[in-house]
Image (cartoon, rainbow, N blue to C red):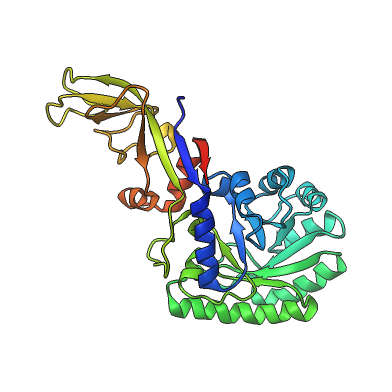
Amino acid sequence: MQSTLAVVSLKNIQSNLLAIRRIARAPVIAVVKDDAYGHGAVAVAEALADMVAMFAVSTVEEGARLVHAGIRKDVLVLTPPLTREEGMRARALGLVLTLSSFPVLRVLRHAGRGVRAHLAVNTGMNRYGFSPSEVERALDLASSGGIAVEGVFSHLYLPEDGAARAAQEAAFRRACATVRARFPFAMRHLAASGGIACGADALDSVRAGLSLYGYLPEGVRAPVRLHPAMKVYAAVSHCGTLYGGGVGYAAAARAYPSLYTLRAGYGDGFFRAGGIGAEGKLCMDACVCAGEKPFAGRVCILSDAAAYARAHATSAYEVLVRIGKGAEKRYVR
């Protein structure tokens, strides 16, 4: 087996969900975008289907995979559609789309009556969403176009900053009042993983992404313990002794009694600088390590994505998606 192996604990993901639900005291929208942050969207969705209010993905294609796999919970597509064809496909599949701007509203109107949507409000992140002053006009056009606005949401840009969070919450509540005057049962959701941990208003539901997989955004602390769900293993593809002056892409730092090579490198999503027990820089598909290991055995090279991320000045989000994307998955319950 040449590929890296990601062993994913579905039990840990379920445990994390229960912990999140206790903190938020609200139903959870499970975010399984980008293949569930590298953990495998279909397997994760199957494990959580009876525990969540709905799922959220990035694209219509991701949503289609869940529907075709037999997932029956509602699926919210967080990235706004760009074409009529995307809107029509989503309508046929029963997906819930993000309505975030007037150009997107035209796309949804052209997709046909009966499109389901959650209206996105820009409360300060400036990524997607109508400004609060645009919400009423957007609702008028959505109603006349036969778009079913089933929810309204926004996103906190710095949940650990109490003042910034309060300003966004206030703006969002005003927008929600406008939406609910027209669509009384629209689901309101604002807090994602960081907001949940920081005590943001849960409203009708919360969106749990990174926290499902055992981590929180940098600088945010969890009021409960979360359990990382993924460990990554690589196969030992060579064993030997030092000859000459190099170890991988570096000069030998010392006289190594023995060396072994792992079949993992930056082609598998790891950073070339190293950090997975390798001596020197990683190769594209291999790295050299000090010591002895049995040939063809497996070595755990990643168990803490947050620690690996800190060593490379990035986030656990990036690490999980990069490394999980190409790994073979094995699920334990």
Question: Which residue is at 48% across, 53% downward?
Answer: 12
Question: Which residue is at 64% across, 61% downward?
Answer: 52
Q: Residue 130's quadrant in the figure?
A: bottom right
Question: Which residue is at 56% across, 49% downward?
Answer: 36
Q: Where 143 falls versus 9 (above or below)?
A: below
Q: Position of residue 173 (x, y in %)?
A: 63, 80
Q: Can residue 281 be seen in the rendering of this structure?
A: yes
Question: Which residue is at 50% across, 58% downward?
Answer: 15
Residue at the extreme front of the image, as rendered: 333
Relative placement, left or right, of 125 versus 294 is: right
Q: Where 193 falls versus 200 (above or below)?
A: above
Q: Can residue 271 be seen in the rendering of this structure?
A: no
Q: How many marks?
A: 0
Residue at the extreme left of the image, as rendered: 255
Q: Where 235 falls versus 91 (above or below)?
A: above
Relative placement, left or right, of 232 versus 171 is: left
Q: Where 5 falls versus 75 (above or below)?
A: above
Relative placement, left or right, of 82 versus 22 is: right
Judging depth in this view, the residue of 240 and 157 nearest the camera is 240
Q: Position of residue 163 (x, y in %)?
A: 45, 80
Q: Position of residue 23 (x, y in %)?
A: 50, 71
Q: Where is residue 251 in the image (x, y as percent from the top left)?
A: 18, 28
